[in-house]
Each structure stands twice: as structure tokens, then as C-alpha cells.
Amino acid sequence: MLDPEPDGPADRIAARLDGHPFLDSAAVLILGYVLISLVMLALGLLLVHGPLGGVRAWDHEVTAWFADHRMSVLNAVTEWATYIANTEGVVGVALVVSIFLLARRHWREVVVLMGGLAVEVTVFLTVNYLVERPRPDVVRLNDTPSTASFPSGHVAASLVLWAVIAIIVGVVTTNRVARAIAWVPVAMLPLLIAFARVYRGMHNPTDVLAGALLGLMALFCAIAAGRVWTVGTR
């Protein structure tokens, strides 16, 4: 997935930039940040201030329903899910994986992992600040942070983190079992975290959907940066 197609977009981008692989990859990540921010900002402003009253009403109905039907078992499960997607957990896993990769001189893979997360968090902070959507008007099971509701950074970061790790596993090993296992967290954790954030009253459903979209776009941006790196090191 990180190997570009011959004469594909990565070749053309690298030829146009014609610099150090790190600088070329950084340029791709910066451009990705700008484009993704514009897309997410447009969606956020449309959702919060546009003629989408029916969507906003649906958001409230869903969060209110979950708030009225909480159970002790789900309270515990969603607390755990939220914890593993917190900034500390994501950064900790990313650092451990990066140190392992650096020790084996997998520079490209480190760029993809840290670059993807960097794009995700910078877009999140930019859009979150500018859109400034209030969190759901229900009793929340977590302390309310200073950030706003749109989009869900927990969902976006978990998607980028575990998808990139799965891609890296596919690059560094040919073991089919390891490759298959690496995709299990990608299939499960973002969905569980999205549910947890709505269930616990921290986000509206459209916030977690936007978080998933942000995560996917940041992931594609990181893959593009990795392919440009590959071209630059040939």
C-alpha cells in the first residue's frame, strides 16, 4: 500500500518537488492539512449553522435516548473504550511503534505514522476551534474538556493509528496471520469508540461520523506522503 504505481501521482509529485524525501513528504502532509481542513470546516459550518435543523434534531434525539438508557455494563465498557483513545494512549502507542521502527531503520513507516497523526490532530484543532459546536445537552459520563464537539478527535485518531499500524505490519512481514490480526483493531476499535463517545454524551452522532471522515482523509494523506518518500529514495 505504500509502494507507488509506476508513473502514478507519487512520481509526478516527487518530480515536481524534486527535493529531499523528507521535505517532499512534509509538503504532501502540509497540503493535505490545508485541503482536509477546508473540507471539514465546510461540513462543520454547514452542520452547525446551515439549514440542517432536521439533522441537528436527530443528533439530539439519539444522544438523549442513550442518556436515558444507560447500563452499568455499557458504562464500564465505554469508559475503557474512551480511555484507550485518549491522547495519552494514542501518543503512547505511536511512540512505542515509532521507536521500534526507528531501531530497524524503517524511516518511511515512521513518517507515515507520525505524519498521519500530525495531520489528524492539527486539522482537528483547527476545525474544532473554528466551528465551536457545543457538546450534547445531556448528562455526560466524562469530564468535559475545553475542546468543542465537532469533529470527534477520539474516533479520528484511533482510526489513523490502528490503520497505519496494520499497513506497517503488512509492509514489514509476510506472515498472513500477523497481517490479518493487525486489521482486527481497525475493524473494531473505531466503531466501539464512536459508540462510546455518543453513549457517554460527549459527541453527537454526526460528530463521530465526521471524525471517521477526518481519520480516513488523514490516512490517505499519510499514505500519499509515504509513496512520495518511496519515490524520493529510489
Image (cartoon, grey):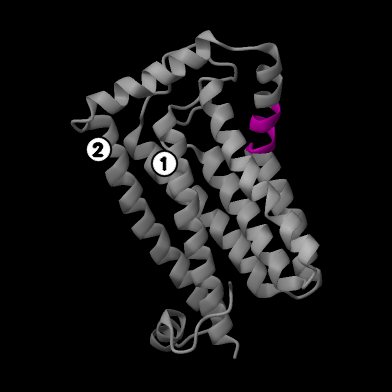
**Residue, x 77% and y 71% (percent of image)?**
173
Identify the secondary structure beneath mark 1. Answer: helix
**Residue, x 56% and y 38% (percent of image)?**
154
Identify the disc placed on residue 46. 2
Identify the disc placed on residue 210. 1
Q: Position of residue 227 (x, y in %)?
A: 53, 76
Kind of residue at disc 2:
Leu
Whether residue 115 is visible to the viewer of this picture, yes or no, is yes
Circle 2 crowding by C-alpha within 10 Å: few under 14, some 14–19, many from 20: few
Quadrant where the C terminus is found in the figure: bottom right
**Residue, x 40% and y 45% (percent of image)?**
126
Quadrant where the N terminus is found in the figure: bottom right
- 203, above or below 127, in the image: above
Please state the extent of the stretch shown in magenta in the rendering. Answer: 80-86
Q: Position of residue 144 (x, y in %)?
A: 53, 21
Identify the secondary structure beneath mark 2. Answer: helix
